[in-house]
Amino acid sequence: MIATYSIQQWLFADARGRYDIDLAESGVQFQRLRDIELDPDWELDYSIDRGIPELREAVAGLYQRPSSEDSIVITHGAQEALYLLYRSVLRAGDHVVTTSPGWQQSWEVPSHIGCEVSVLPMTPGEPFDAEALARLITPKTKLLVLNSPGNPSGYRFTERDWTVLLDVARAHDLIVVNDEEYLLDFAESVVHRYPKALSVSGLSKVYGLPALRIGWAIGTPDIIAAMVNYKRYTTVSNSWVWERVAVDVLKDRDRHVQRYHEFVDEGLSRLLRFAEEHAPHMQLVRPAGTPFAWFNLRIPASSQHVAERLLDEQRVLVMPAEVFGSEAGLRVSYARPAEVLDEGLGRLGELISKMHSAR
């Protein structure tokens, strides 16, 4: 059996019904059905396994590439894109390199397949050691899993990071995938940096449309074909209706990105004030444009314990480091309406002050 998915277990089971304020969701404040347009004459037929041509063309435009049926697959969210990649290109005995804190899927699914997995522990707020990650590569390494801008750390790779990692990837002929859900300018995508790279992204995080479950992968034709074939065994296709909505969203992308910036910019100013007030006990790792931020905890309690108490005493949901394979940290989402964010941060600050005073 595969290990319990701790992120989803926390969100959908352990915390369910215990909070009034959600500072855990990793995207910008969600939108509503009234914010999109539906045509009552749209068909309710199956879509295409790769996704409708109009949406693939819109995605290709993000990357400033000509539309190509064999280089893009539309998926049921970005997470399905990553899952399809792991299941279609990895075999037992392959070696995979990834990082933590991060998305548990990147080490559990390859391990479940029978791969050897090396996970580089990172401490948010400390310099990223690209050389240490590169040293994990072996002759059996097949896949390098990256996430920049990163969830949950908010870290964005520097040009030097990319140079170190991709030089090693070239030397070992690796497949490189970067989760680019928080990338706004796809001219910076990994697919422009390295020939055997895949970019995975979607409409959940920046656009506030996770209910559409629209994601995608763009990469080399052989890998995309393998992913499409595996998708036929799982979800077959996405919703034609939501794919059609996604076309309209990407045509109107500037408006959605502007909305994202407004939430992030306003929320960050409030988050910085909160961080200054609680600096001795919570060290903010300033995010690089993500709608959430990481706090390193400086109190004598596990982050899981803090998150549990925050639910029980303050009815606020945040993400403890333990669900990301780490410790002593909290991921706090701040791209929220001002009144929601202020109330949630106020309750978090009250608990942290109480726990410090009880020492």
Image: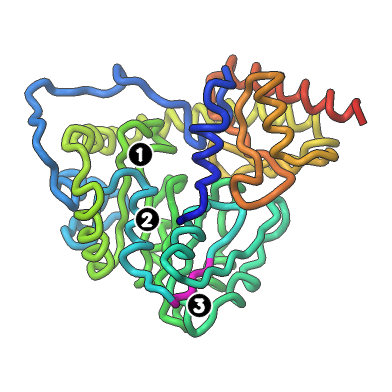
Q: Are marks 1 and 3 in contact (CB under 8 Å)?
A: no
Characterize the magenta stretch by its predominant secondary structure: strand
Residue 191 lies within the magenta run: no
At label 3, counting other C-alpha atoms closer than 10 Å, the crowd grade (few under 14, some 14-19, many 20 or more) is few
Label 2, secondary structure: give it: helix
Q: Which mark is residue 167?
A: 3
Residue 288 in view of the camera: yes
1 or 3: mark nearer the eye: 1
The three-letter amino acid code for the residue at tag 1 is: Leu
1 or 2: mark nearer the eye: 2
State whether residue 179 is above or below residue 278. Answer: below
Expressed as whole percent of the image width and height from the top left, the position of residue 80 reads 34, 50
Residue 94 lies within the magenta run: yes
Foreground of the two, 22 or 65:
22
Q: Which residue is mark 1?
A: 203
Q: Is residue 200 left or right of residue 284?
A: left
N-terminal label among 1 and 2: 2
Q: Which mark is residue 83?
A: 2
N-terminal label among 2 and 3: 2
Expressed as whole percent of the image width and height from the top left, the position of residue 283 reads 77, 41
2 or 3: mark nearer the eye: 2
Please provide the residue range marked out in magenta: 93-97
